[in-house]
């Protein structure tokens, strides 16, 4: 499975699609569902608009703001979602066929409707009418109505790029992969569901309206596209009285100019940026995040409404470069530009999200041409691709097959980190035939040293991932370095959670009072494993944090803490924060992740029956959701119901046969049931399928040793160390097993390596 597909399974933005062919039309599979506006678009004049905070619609806004409305029309925002008509549909529904993974999809027109004949939830071919288009460039996707108020995004999309760029064709979003019916990544599955995955960012003021009891949606919105009030807030008061400001004041650039320092010639803002309102408004959709509630109030902090992802290993490279589809916010807040006060609209025209200037002219509007637009800076031939600013400082990663998106961390190229950390670099992105060592030497020769840039946290996060002996020291130093991006410092605290000790606790605790909500949230979560007597006094003050995401994290961290540990005011704050936590999960009740989180909360409070119910619900929504299956089996272990755990894991393996975590968990169940040959087969499969997780190989090696297969056990553990040289469990096992065999020299060698990692 591709990285994009794995990311989609974890709940990224949905990948949507479709295809066409003119053949005799079979019966249309059509639920008849069409999402309607929450309220009909207003036709009132500004004077007739109500005085309450209500949405009035683009037509009312345009009656006064004609220039802005004209700019917005035809933009990607205005065309984010449209009814499928001859004017809006870009793909050629002329009988085209696309063959992928044994399925032939056909796209054609019938009785004035656009139709896709493709594999449905039962794996058979059906004809599906297209109700909506989704996006316009560089690809257009198509939505199909399903029963229960669902809209599903086809996996066949139209490449709307020019033909000279390889476009004007149908393509499959999962080309080269076999994703069949029943898989969450299949276009009829949960990960291609518009109601959860897409609607919030492609329409204005969306209300998902999921009915958990019925498993159905009644999703509504104010306007089908991203309209004026999506950004500026409900406009009724302003329409009734234009002297009243809009709910979202986007005025951070008003009266601001960028000039060049007369001594350094570097850009500087005429006055410091005092807020991040505009950036956080854009981040509502241009960030990797989970929504916490739908009662969004324009102007409040991003973390009041969303839980923003940190620099997770599966989303970002250790140095913060984009790995998975994370959009722009998590990258931009790493940048020096963000730190110096740049906002989104400094570079992007807000009403028609395009660059304010073309090519390098945009960069040169602030950066001195004599300094940067010269071979003395970029060391490439003038006019060549390598001489472009974005080639080095904003390399692109392609998602959804054709969508190249630039990394907004605007970093200095570091091919030296490619050597030490295995991260990509833009030099070898172009010079693929040369090594990272060549690129690093070349850069050092150009500048007389290795440029470091602003982002200097890669070594710390990489050390944590490897379990390197200096990981704790590096992480603690990163947390304390206020010159590094807050998202990186929060990520360092997150990685200190499994390394809590008297030496690291002060570092984590310092994050509780940090000015940045991401850091505070990470600190609260990192303290959750502490004993309740230590945890309660540290975490309880965060129940009254001004930001919802932090309060929710505190409620989860304090689950199971005795009420006597809290003051009356703290107990009341815990009740309020718990309500916010439960409401956030209820909003996502159509996703297995929400039920998994609720189960975790119930487990911490000792409510085993409630935890079991939530995990069962998660698996009912997605039988292939591995975390729920593994955790339910582990709960059954606690309840001495291993046979039930085995049944759960085997059922999940029917949907995710090659998942190493399922194989590992099943192997442990079989060990406890003393079915060792079967257990060894499952543990061996886990180690083979998941070599990136040292735990799988370690447990397999220990099981082999317990079965008397000492030579194989030592080989299995040595293989783990070859891939994970800092895995302490495997080193300890190798030392002990070698000692037991009487191989003192080998035992001392392994023990010395372990002692070097952990002198304790």
Image (spheres, grey):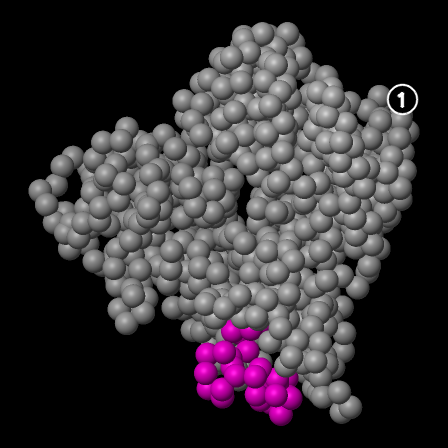
**The magenta stretch spans residue 373:** yes
Q: Secondary structure at mark 1?
A: helix
- Compared with 11, 514 (above or below) is below
User: Which is more toward the observer, 664 or 539?
Assistant: 664
Quick one: which residue is furthest to the left in this view?
24
Q: Position of residue 407 (x, y in %)?
A: 55, 64
User: Which is more toward the observer, 534 or 720?
Assistant: 720
In the figure, residue 328 lies in which quadrant?
bottom right
Where, quadrant-wise, is the N terminus in this rendering? top left
Q: Which residues make up the magenta segment?
A: 365-394
Q: Position of residue 581 (x, y in %)?
A: 68, 34
Residue found at x 46% / y 22%: 652
Q: Position of residue 171 (x, y in %)?
A: 29, 53
Q: Is residue 397 visible?
A: yes
User: Which is more toward the observer, 399 or 609?
Assistant: 399
Where, quadrant-wise, is the C terminus in this rendering? top right
Residue found at x 54% / y 8%: 675
In the figure, residue 567 lies in which quadrant?
top right
- Compared with 450, 192 (above or below) is above
Q: Is residue 578 visible?
A: no
Residue under pointer 1: 564
For mark 1, does the 10 Å Cα neighbourhood hold few (<14), some (14 to 19), or many (20 or more) residues?
A: few
Horizontal placement of 14 versus 174: left or right? right
Residue found at x 65% / y 51%: 311
Q: Position of residue 317 (x, y in %)?
A: 60, 54
**The magenta stretch spans residue 372:** yes
Residue found at x 49% / y 86%: 381
């Amino acid at each position: 499975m591709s990285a994009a597909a794995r990311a989609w399974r974890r709940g990224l933005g949905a990948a949507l699609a479709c295809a066409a062919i003119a053949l005799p039309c079979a019966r249309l599979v059509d639920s008849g569902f069409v999402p309607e506006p929450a309220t009909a678009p207003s036709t009132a004049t500004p004077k007739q608009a109500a005085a309450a905070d209500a949405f009035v619609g683009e037509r009312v806004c345009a009656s006064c703001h004609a220039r802005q409305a004209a700019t917005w029309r035809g933009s990607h925002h205005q065309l984010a979602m449209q009814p499928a008509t001859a004017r809006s549909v870009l793909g050629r529904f002329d009988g085209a066929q696309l063959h992928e993974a044994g399925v032939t999809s056909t796209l054609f027109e019938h009785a004035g409707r656009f139709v896709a004949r493709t594999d449905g939830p039962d794996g058979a071919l059906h004809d599906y009418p297209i109700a909506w288009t989704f996006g316009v460039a560089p690809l257009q996707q198509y939505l199909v109505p399903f029963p229960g108020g669902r809209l599903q995004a086809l996996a066949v999309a139209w490449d709307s790029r020019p033909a000279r760029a390889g476009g004007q064709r149908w393509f499959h979003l999962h080309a080269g992969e076999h994703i069949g019916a029943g898989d969450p990544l299949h276009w009829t599955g949960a990960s291609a569901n518009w109601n959860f995955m897409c609607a919030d960012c492609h329409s204005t003021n969306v209300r998902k309206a999921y009915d958990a009891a019925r498993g159905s949606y009644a999703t509504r919105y104010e306007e089908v596209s991203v309209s004026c009030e999506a950004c500026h807030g409900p406009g009724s008061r302003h329409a009734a009285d234009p002297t009243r400001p809009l709910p979202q004041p986007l005025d951070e650039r008003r009266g601001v100019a960028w000039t060049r320092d007369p001594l350094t010639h570097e850009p500087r803002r005429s006055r410091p940026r005092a807020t991040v309102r505009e950036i956080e408004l854009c981040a509502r959709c241009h960030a990797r995040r989970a929504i916490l509630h739908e009662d969004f109030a324009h102007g409040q902090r991003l973390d009041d409404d969303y839980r923003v992802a940190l620099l997770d290993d599966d989303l970002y490279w250790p140095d913060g470069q984009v790995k998975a589809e994370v959009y722009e916010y998590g990258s931009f807040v790493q940048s020096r530009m963000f730190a110096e006060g740049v906002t989104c609209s400094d570079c992007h025209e807000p009403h028609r999200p395009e660059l304010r200037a073309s090519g390098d002219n945009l960069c040169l509007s602030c950066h001195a041409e004599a300094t940067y637009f010269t071979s003395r800076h970029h060391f490439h031939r003038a006019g060549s691709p390598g001489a472009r600013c974005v080639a080095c400082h904003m390399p692109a990663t392609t998602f959804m097959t054709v969508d190249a998106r630039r990394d907004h961390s605007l970093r200095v190229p570091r091919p030296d980190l490619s050597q030490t950390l295995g991260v990509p670099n833009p030099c070898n992105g172009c010079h693929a035939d040369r090594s990272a060592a060549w690129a690093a030497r070349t850069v050092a020769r150009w500048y007389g040293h290795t440029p470091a840039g602003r982002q200097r946290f890669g070594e710390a996060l990489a050390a944590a991932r490897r379990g390197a002996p200096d990981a704790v020291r590096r992480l603690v130093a990163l947390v304390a370095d206020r010159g590094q991006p807050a998202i990186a410092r929060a990520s360092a605290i997150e990685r200190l959670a499994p390394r809590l000790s008297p030496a690291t606790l002060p570092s984590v605790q310092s994050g509780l009072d940090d000015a940045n909500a991401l850091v505070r949230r990470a600190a609260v979560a990192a303290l959750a494993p502490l004993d309740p007597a230590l945890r309660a006094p540290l975490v309880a003050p965060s129940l009254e944090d001004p930001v919802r995401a932090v309060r929710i994290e505190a409620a989860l961290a304090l689950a199971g803490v005795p009420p006597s540990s809290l003051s009356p005011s703290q107990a009341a704050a815990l009740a309020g924060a718990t309500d916010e936590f439960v409401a956030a999960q209820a909003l996502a009740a159509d996703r297995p992740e929400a039920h998994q989180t609720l189960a975790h909360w119930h487990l911490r409070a000792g409510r085993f029956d409630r935890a079991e119910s939530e995990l069962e619900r998660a698996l009912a929504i997605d039988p292939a959701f591995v975390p729920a299956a593994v955790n339910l089996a582990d709960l059954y272990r606690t309840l001495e119901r291993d046979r039930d755990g085995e049944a759960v894991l085997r059922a999940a393996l029917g949907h995710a046969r090659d998942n190493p975590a399922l194989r590992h968990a099943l192997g442990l169940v079989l060990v406890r049931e003393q079915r060792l040959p079967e257990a060894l087969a499952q543990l061996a499969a886990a180690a083979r399928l998941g070599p990136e997780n040292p735990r799988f190989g370690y447990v397999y090696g220990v099981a082999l040793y317990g079965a008397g297969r000492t030579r194989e056990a030592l080989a299995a553990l040595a293989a783990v160390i070859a891939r994970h040289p800092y895995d302490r469990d495997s080193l300890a096992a190798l030392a002990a097993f070698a000692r037991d065999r009487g191989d003192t020299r080998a035992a001392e060698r392994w023990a010395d390596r372990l002692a070097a990692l952990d002198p304790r």
